[in-house]
Each structure stands twice: as C-alpha cells, then as structure tokens.
Image (cartoon, rainbow, N blue to C red):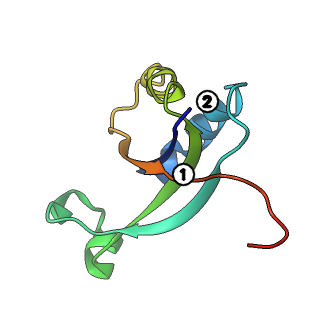
Amino acid sequence: MSNKLLKLYFSREQKADLVDCLIQLDYLSGFSLYDIDGFSRNHERFDIGEQIRGARRMMMAEVICAADDVTRIREALSQLNFKEPVRYVMQSVEDVGHSDYI
C-alpha cells in the first residue's frame, strides 16, 4: 500500500473546524499543524496588517495516510462548507516508520 503526504493550507479561522474534522477520522493515526506565513500575488485580499507585513498568517496541516484515504479526507473536509477554499498538496511517501536509529 502506498502512502501519501497530504499538506493542507487554510486560514486560522478555519483551524478549529478542520482539526475537529480530522480528529474524527478514525483511519488517521494523527497529523501535525504549523503556523505559516502565506505569500500571494493576490495580496489585495489580505487585511491591512497582512498587506503591510506582506504575508498572511495561515496554518498548514500535514497528514501521512494511505493513498486510498485521500479521497475520504477530501470528502470529509468538503462537508465543512468553508467560504474560503482549503488548498492542498499531495506527495508520494517513500517510507514511513518509527525508529530509534535513523
């Protein structure tokens, strides 16, 4: 079974709902969240502080999952009906595991 790294990019306002959604998916063993600065050519949509700073404060979630689970995750997130889209990137993962000696 091949694994995927699914990276989700979303606003801070979407964080609570997105986390609640992912936590409820029993086929996921976990995920990681990060604060990030998002840069865009469409910066006119940023609030004044973000325009001055030049970046938008955003969140990113990383989920390592089975390739078959990606569709189910996307379907679960689509039920949230956010007015802003959740952007994503998906990458193949060569290996996943736990080791005391990497």
* Secondary structure found at label 2: helix
- Which of the labelled discs sits on residue 61, or is there none? 1
- Report crowding for label 2: few under 14, some 14 to 19, many 20 or more residues within 10 A (C-alpha): some
Q: Position of residue 20 (x, y in %)?
A: 66, 33
- Report crowding for label 1: few under 14, some 14 to 19, many 20 or more residues within 10 A (C-alpha): some
Q: Position of residue 13 (x, y in %)?
A: 50, 47
Q: Earlier in the sequence, mark 1 or mark 2?
A: 2
Q: Looking at this view, is 67 or 72 the one in front? A: 67
Query: Which of the image's four quarters has the C terminus?
Result: bottom right
Apparent side of residue 102 relative to residue 47 in the rendered image (left or right): right
Instruction: Specify whether residue 50 is in view.
Output: yes
Apparent side of residue 24 relative to residue 62 in the rendered image (left or right): right
Q: Are marks 1 and 2 in contact (CB under 8 Å)?
A: no
Total numbered labels placed on residues in the image: 2
- Which of the labelled discs sits on residue 49, or is there none? none
Q: Position of residue 60 (x, y in %)?
A: 49, 56
Q: CA distance from mark 1 to mark 2?
A: 12 Å
Q: Residue lying furthest right in this view?
A: 100
Q: Looking at this view, is 1 or 45 the one in front? A: 1
- Which of the labelled discs sits on residue 21, or is there none? 2
Please identify the quarter of the rendering in which residue 54 is found: bottom left
Q: Is residue 54 above or below residue 92?
A: below
* Secondary structure found at label 1: strand
Apparent side of residue 51 relative to residue 33 in the rendered image (left or right): left
Q: Position of residue 93 (x, y in %)?
A: 50, 51
Q: Residue at x 52, y 53 (%)?
A: 94
